[in-house]
Image (cartoon, rainbow, N blue to C red):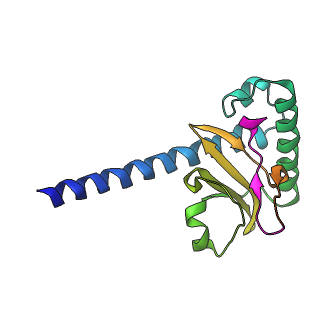
Amino acid sequence: MRKTTVIIMITFLIGACAQNKNQDIKTLQAFFDEVVLTENYTNEDLLKFFNVENDESIALLKYQIKNLKTKFQQNSDDYQIIAHNDINNYELSSNLEYNNYDEVYYLVINEALIAPLIIKNDRLISISFALYKTLDKKNKYPMLLEEL
């Protein structure tokens, strides 16, 4: 009986994680489709995906979105969103340091990592390599919008 309960709990946890991953990917795809790959977006559009309230955070976010748009224009609109835990399946690597890799995804264009995407509680909290702060020469730690 105890083994059955443990197996059921593990199955439930695996299913819940997969459901969260699917929801995160849908949120990220909506962000790219509704903000990054469109000509015009509003601050209200940003609030669907980010918890940013001050003007400085919004300005920084718009700058990062502009950089992402440039990456798409230089490459293509064909992109993938890959979970950090799946990165090795694509023969990619990252030196990102973060305390919860279940929240980390990557934007991949033409088989190259373009930006880490960190999502927490259905909101993006980091979207760009340009937001890295380097504490040493080897690892990179994301600057999180929620900390600004």
Q: Is 7 in front, or is 70?
A: 7
Q: Quadrant of residue 50?
A: top right
**Residue drawn at (69%, 50%), measured in percent from left and top?**
117
**Residue drawn at (59%, 56%), measured in percent from left and top?**
101
Is 127 positioned to the left or the right of 66 in the image?
left
Q: Is 83 in front, or is 110?
A: 83
The count of marks equals 0
Q: Is residue 142 above or below residue 91?
A: above
Q: Quadrant of residue 14?
A: bottom left
Q: Residue furthest front?
A: 135
**Residue drawn at (62%, 72%), measured in percent from left and top?**
90
Q: Quadrant of residue 139?
A: bottom right
Is 13 positioned to the left or the right of 72 in the image?
left
Q: Is residue 85 above or below residue 50?
A: below
Q: Is 35 in front, or is 60?
A: 60
Which image quadrant: the C terminus? top right
Give the x, y percent position of residue 61: 82, 37
Which image quadrant: the N terminus? bottom left
**Residue drawn at (19%, 53%), measured in percent from left and top?**
5
Quick check: is 56 in the magenta stretch? no
Give the x, y percent position of residue 103: 59, 50
Q: Is 41 in front, or is 16?
A: 16
Q: Residue furthest left?
A: 1
Give the x, y percent position of residue 21: 51, 50
Quick check: is 141 in the magenta stretch? yes
- Magenta-drawn segment: 137-148
Q: Is residue 97 above or below residue 55?
A: below
